[in-house]
Amino acid sequence: MNPSAEPIPSRTRNQLVPGRVGEPRCLRLIERRPRSNGLALLLWVMLDYLHGLSVFRQTGPCVTVFGSARTRPEDTNYQLARRMGAAIARLGFTVMTGGGPGIMEAANRGAREAGGRSVGCNIELHFEQHPNPYLDRCATLRFFSARKMLLERYSYAFIVFPGGAGTVDELFETLTLIQTGKMEPLPIVLMGAEYWREMMCFVEKMAEAGTISGGDPQLIYVTDSVEEAIAHLRRHAIAPFGLRLAARRPWRWFSRRIRHGTDARLRSPGGATAV
């Protein structure tokens, strides 16, 4: 059938409106004055951003570690993330995570044990999300949008361990920001080749179908080795940005906790901490 011959549907003047019990929870911030919902939402989100920016303003260059909150300490991925956190800290980076249990806890724990800085950007949830005990600084936020922005803002690389829907969301948002030019081409490392095998096949399929650029799959580096991941960070997260080791200053009085570990961290050229 010729599409041009199809009849044009008539226009409707009807429109759905939210009911008293049908509004999404995030919109019901001020029940008594529905017209204020938009302004209230804007203010709550702004407060989230301001809180996170004030907490992390002195963290310096970070590597963000994503992964499942459900991974147990006896799991091999937990131990691998713990080793990765320690290795990242020895490079001079601050280890940043979502601040919760599982893989996040393991990476923060490894950084703490290596004497490096360990921070978390937590989120308010009804289950399984509470700040882990290995954080030097932690900001707990209401909105995922603010949380993801903060996890991306301070990072020079992203390490992704096996995880669920939230981890995949964080991975593809980061990839989207890079491929659209909203973020510099920072390294993305997937830990666990077997776990991510089907997903990487799908990424290759998207490239073959032309729904993403042909070079986009090369933005992701897949490995099972902490040593290979660290070598990749040296090549793509340190050298291109001119980061160098410099004496580490203690956090100011308003930090949640001040620790003294290794005496060096990465800084940008000119001596100013890269943020």
Image (tube, rainbow, N blue to C red):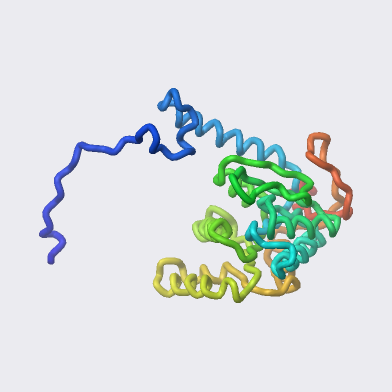
**Residue 36 is at least partly visible in this image:** yes
- Image coordinates for residue 266, horizontal then vertical, percent: 79, 55
| Residue 214 shown left or right of residue 101 in the figure | left
Query: Is 143 located above or below residue 156 in the figure?
Result: above
Q: Residue at x 44, y 74 (%)?
A: 205
Front residue of this view, candidates 233 and 145 = 145
Q: Residue at x 75, y 47 (%)?
A: 59
180 displayed left or right of 6:
right
Q: Is residue 26 left or right of residue 18?
A: right
Residue 275 seen anywhere in this rendered image of the structure: no
Query: Is 122 located above or below residue 176 in the figure?
Result: above
Quadrant housing residue 158: bottom right
Q: Camera-side residue: 114 or 92?
A: 114
The one of 151 and 24 positioned closer to us in this rendering: 24
Expressed as whole percent of the image width and height from the top left, the position of residue 137 reads 76, 44
Residue at 56% x, 46% y: name it: 144
Q: Give left or right: position of 112 versus 103.
A: right
Residue in view at x 88 percent, y 52 percent: 261
The quadrant in which the N terminus is found is: bottom left
Viewer-nearest residue: 188 or 78: 78
On the image, the x and y values in percent for residue 90 come to: 82, 61
Q: State which quadrant residue 31 falls in.
A: top left
- Residue 78 lies, in percent from the top left, at 72, 64
Whether residue 31 is situated above or below residue 186 in the rendered picture: above
User: How many marks do you count on the picture?
Assistant: 0
